[in-house]
Image: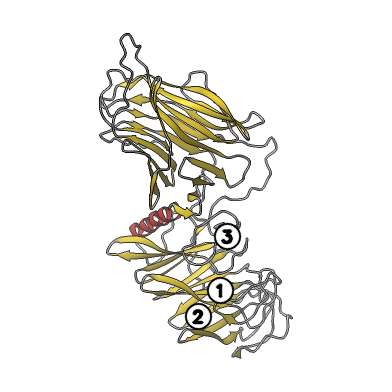
Amino acid sequence: MSGVVRCGVNILFQRSRHACVVVFLRLLAGLAVAAFSHSLFAATAPARSQQLTSPDQVPEGLAKSDWSSIRAAYEAGRHAFQPTPTGWQARNPGQQWTTSFDRRGFVATPKAGGWTWGLELQGYGFGDHQQTIAGTPAVQAVGSRLTYQWDAAVQEWFVNDPRGLEHGFTVSTRPAALTAPGAQPTALSFLLAVRGELRPHVTTDALGVEFRDAAGASVLNYAGLKVWDADGKILTSHFELAASSPTATGEQHAVRLLVDERDARYPITIDPIAQQAYLKASNTPSSVVGVGDYFGSAVAVSGDTVVVGANQEDSSTTGVNSTPDELASNAGAAYVFVRSGTTWTQQAYLKAHQVTADDQFGISVAVSGDTVVVGAHQEDSSTTGVTVNGTPDENATNAGAAYVFVRSGTTWSQQAYLKASTVRSQDYFGYSVAVSGDTVVVGAYKEGSSTGVQNGATPTTNTSAFWSGAAYVFVRSGTTWSQQAYLKASTVRSQDYFG
């Protein structure tokens, strides 16, 4: 009866069969609906990067298999574990929560707030013969997988992917059982302390656990507990509440998962399903806010490099390859993918050097060789001209900006922060961008001047043709960018949306 025991929290119904004992707790969020892509605007100007109008549309210049590989790489990149000062964290956009790991257990915090929930393994074994979990484990994080190695026998692991958070334990040898004369057989048990404010309630059939908030509303449900051995034989199993214990902030609740594994042949798989409850108000608003990042709202390709905009991504972090959070709604992001042979991988996660909610960085993207341009048409700074990473303010609503990133080897960095020579609110500078070699063009389709073409950085002087639109040409000399021209149509009329 030696083997490996795995316990887990996972999304959906993947059956993982290994030569070991497997315990899966599957976690599925009812609100796990993240739109892959949905374009806000149709592509109406040739200078604009291509925009997709449905999740199934394949960008021009890419094979369907390439686009599928890029989407897979994107999902892997945004689900990766990231180090923090106290441990690690992993975002799950589909589940709309961030899970923190502190070398003891985990806590999931939903984007909308209202509750926290997590588990912490405290012990495992048979009857009174329990091995207590103590100390600090050896931790390893690779991509979307993180492991806690507690001792020579027990490893706790987590996999974060679009399905949700898979949480498991691997016990390499069967725990010792009491063998005193006349001792009654006992079930293999796992003691899990509950973290957060939610309280556990075992269901009537004992095959699930409801987690309820202070008002008694069901927020998380464990249900459908099923256990089978290596021969596929179904084993008896159930949940029970464990004794709570007082803490400085209230009671510490716990649940115990028990399995009658007599006569079973290892590995054993324990597989309940945990689902986040879907709560609706009695009077649902007529308008709802989408939960998607809008990955794919703009795309561009140059050789083996693809850039994808996600103009409603919500992280407040800045720069290249930062650790995302959920603190700046619709700030936006862009992603760089590269192809090696037939394999696509994410090379960079791009954010502006200063991030504000609703900037919509990534509404437009362009790439030429090792240069990427990203538009943010709702950026609000009143600063003018070109800098490397200037200090924006918030004094010109929806004035817009564009950002230039360059690659050296495989490393990306921001090279320029582009603003028009004259900045006004609602110009939407950056709504479209294009790049070829050392030349960048930026559209501002709601710019309102009636002035004609001007070379250099001569400022516009009037606003007598509202929403007539304009375009701006920037050129690079060495690593320095400057505005070369301000373009208007030969005949300027209001609401032409030039650019």
Q: Quadrant of residue 305?
A: bottom left
Q: Helix, strand or loop at disc 2?
A: strand
Q: Which residue is mark 3?
A: 316
Nearer-N-terminus badge (3/1): 3
2 or 1: mark nearer the eye: 1
Decide: marks 2, 1 in contact (CB < 8 A)? yes
Q: CA distance from mark 3 to mark 2?
A: 27 Å
Q: Helix, strand or loop at disc 1?
A: strand
Q: Which mark is residue 344?
A: none
Near mark 3 (Cα within 10 A), the count class, few <14, some 14-19 or many ≥20, is many
Q: Residue 253, how many percent across, how many down?
A: 55, 29
Would you say 98 lies left or right of 8 here? right
Q: Residue 265, how many percent across, how many down?
A: 25, 24
**Position of the N terminus by quadrant:** top left
Q: Which residue is mark 1?
A: 402
3 or 2: mark nearer the eye: 3
- Does residue 451 appear in this view? yes
Along the line of sight, the residue nearer the viewer: 243 or 491 = 243
Q: Which residue is mark 2?
A: 440
Nearer-N-terminus badge (2/1): 1
Would you say 174 lies left or right of 219 here? left
Q: Residue 345, how many percent across, how many down?
A: 36, 60
Nearer-N-terminus badge (3/2): 3
